[in-house]
Image: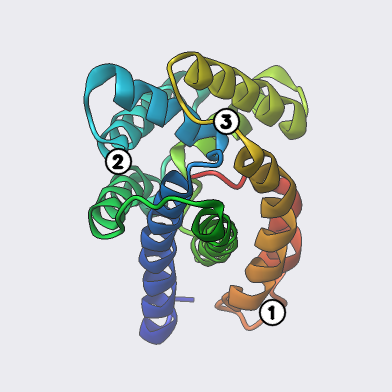
Amino acid sequence: MPERPDRAARRLVQLFAGLALYGASSALLVRADLGLEPWNVLHQGLARLGGLTIGIVSILVGAAVLLLWIPLRQRPGLGTVANVFVVGLAMDGTLALVPGVHGLAVRIPLLLTGVLLNGVATGLYIAARFGPGPRDGLMTGLHRRTGRSIRLMRTTVEVAVVVTGFALGGTVGVGTLLYAVAIGPLAQVFLRLFAVPPATGGSTVVATGTPRGAILRR
């Protein structure tokens, strides 16, 4: 059945709101300066090395990762392509608006807010069901080609990007650990909250089935 316009509009709003919020929440973690998400550790390290903004580096890395989908025979969706650009632009835009902060009394709440909003953003854009982010698709593609578990692929890739990013000057700290522990449960809650009912009116399988398989980083 063709999708109803109101349902399609809701999914599009969720997609772009989620991606924009993801970039904004990542920017808050940058300002908190207590540790970043795994891929942003790499982005920050590369940004410091190359003199670019972290948002631009995020876009460039996302595009490069998307090219790796070709040998993995992954098919991008609207959400995949939008992810590459919207998250990086939203991150740079938020960093331009939010000044640097000093003192743990401000940095800790900023960290907690960033992690929480990141969970909200993840629930929004994954539940919209427009395709995984380029980094998510890399891990699921490796899973299909190697036969190894998604958990193993995620761990291997993210450890590699954290170590590389840290060596380049990216920030690793308590925020990195907090993100790793909290993002899964937060995403599960918000996936259920923002689940879009299927066009057939059936059960909201995306809300219950996605959290276990989702990679949870673009």
Residue 14 drawn at (x, y percent)? 44, 71
Residue type at tag 2: Gly
The residue labelled by disc 2 is: 55
Most foreground residue, 166 or 130? 166
Query: Can residue 148 be seen at all in this image of the molecule?
Result: yes
Q: Which of marks 2 and 1 is in front?
A: 2
**For the residue carrying disc 3, how many other residues have a C-alpha within 10 Å: few (<14), some (14-19), or many (20+)?**
many
**For the residue carrying disc 1, how many other residues have a C-alpha within 10 Å: few (<14), some (14-19), or many (20+)?**
few
Q: In this view, does 132 lie above or below 135?
A: below
Q: Residue at x 37, y 33 (%)?
A: 62
Q: In whole angstroms, how far apart are the C-alphas of marks 2 and 1?
A: 39 Å
Q: In this view, does 154 lie above or below 25?
A: above
Residue type at tag 3: Val
Q: In this view, does 108 lie above or below 197?
A: above
Pointer 2 and pointer 1: residues touching (CB < 8 Å)? no
The residue labelled by disc 1 is: 202
Residue 10 drawn at (x, y percent)? 42, 79
Q: In whole angstroms, how far apart are the C-alphas of marks 1 and 3?
A: 43 Å
